[in-house]
Image (tube, rainbow, N blue to C red):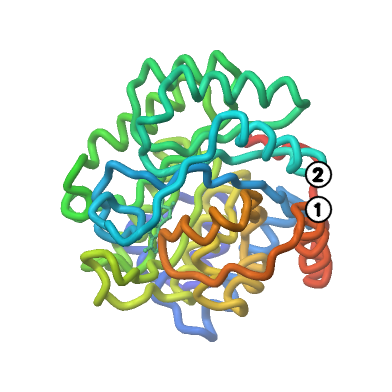
Amino acid sequence: MDFKNLINKIADNYIPTIKEMAAILELDEEKSQYLFRVADEVKKIYHGNYIHIRGIIEFSNYCRCLCKYCGLQADNNELIRYRMTPDEIVENTREAFEAGYKTIVLQSGEDMWYTREKISYIIRNIKKIGDIAITLSVGERDFDDYRQWKEDGADRFLIKQETADENLYNSLHPHSNFKNRIACLKELSRLGYQVGSGFMIGLPGQTTETIAKDIMLLGEIKAGMAGIGPFIPHKRTPLKEHPVGDGFMTLKAVALSRLLYKKMHLPVTTSLGVLSSEHKDIAFKVGANVIMQKVEPYKFRRLYEIYPKKIGDESTIKEERLRLEAYLKSLGLEIATDRGDAF
Ligand code: 5AD
């Protein structure tokens, strides 16, 4: 089938086959311009010209996991580990709220020092600050933890599928498995969380069909948000020699996701920005409508090294927020002022 026709049909709610999706992901630079244009049109209809800015506090880089791509993996004994105290996290959130953030993402490695009770304390105290949406991103935990935190007031949970290929998933995550990850996503959804998922582009053995399956899986698990980012090698991991993921493929995956999932929140991932600022700018024009900004103290940002990246000059949360808003406005975008809930 003619690719423009197929793209139009998907924009009109036709569900494509995996083969059809793979064909779209294989479009060359010239042909993909049509995909990008239609994805931008769909985004504008459902999200206007608005970008949601989320604040993220990376509050601990301790991790019990052995993800083969991640610099925080437990075997990396060169990394200096840190933890923020529950009160530090609450105060950090207050500052972010005062600087204009309406969503705070609390992310860490899988660090069991933060017991169910400690996280409950953090959520309850943040909720006293004001109308601020809390996204937890603390990995695989007991379902009773998830249930308690929802009761405490947590709104969303970010836990990525990483790849829809079960064998690949299991080989990259020797400490856990794909079935458990999907069970977590489904349980979180059942508990009433808005769930965020996502996957990486450029994992070993990944094909365009794998990426197509990843995009379909986002729908099956009813993701409210999906972060799609290129893999970036980190020298203290088993995948240190594996090449960096492709920025152009990342953009096509974002655009195709936008055609299928009109209301979903699709962030411009940090890893895409680290790969190239050009790709980052383009992502906002091919379907993406969210960006995350770190708000924790700089001394911690430097140590939250999932993959290598530059940490800019130190400035206040407010200054950084204003700089980010100015950058988005320079791209012709507007800043959303609501909480940006899913669906
Ligand atoms: N390159 C790109 N993204 C990575 N992540 C982890 N390690 C890497 C890497 N080396 C992503 C994963 C994880 C998120 C916090 O960061 O998708 O869910």
**Residue 123 x %, y %:** 59, 24
**Residue 303 x %, y %:** 47, 58
Say left or right for 167 vs 263. left
Residue at 53% over, 47% down:
58
Is disc 2's CB within 8 Å of ligand 1? no
What crowding class fits label 2: few (fewer than 14 Cα within 10 Å), some (14-19), or many (20 or more)? some
* Residue 342 against residue 229 in the figure, above or below: above
**Residue on which disc 1 sits:** 318
Task: Assign a secondary structure to mark 2.
Answer: loop
Q: Quadrant of the C terminus?
A: top right
Say left or right for 289 vs 206. right
Q: Quadrant of residue 156?
A: top right
* Residue 6 against residue 293 in the figure, above or below: below
* Residue 241 against residue 41 in the figure, above or below: below
Q: Amino acid at mark 1?
A: Lys
Q: Amino acid at mark 2?
A: Gly
* Residue 342 against residue 282 in the figure, above or below: above
Residue at 45% over, 46% down:
82
**Residue on which disc 2 sits:** 100
Q: Earlier in the sequence, mark 2 or mark 1?
A: 2
> Closest to the observer: 236 or 55?
236
What crowding class fits label 1: few (fewer than 14 Cα within 10 Å), some (14-19), or many (20 or more)? some
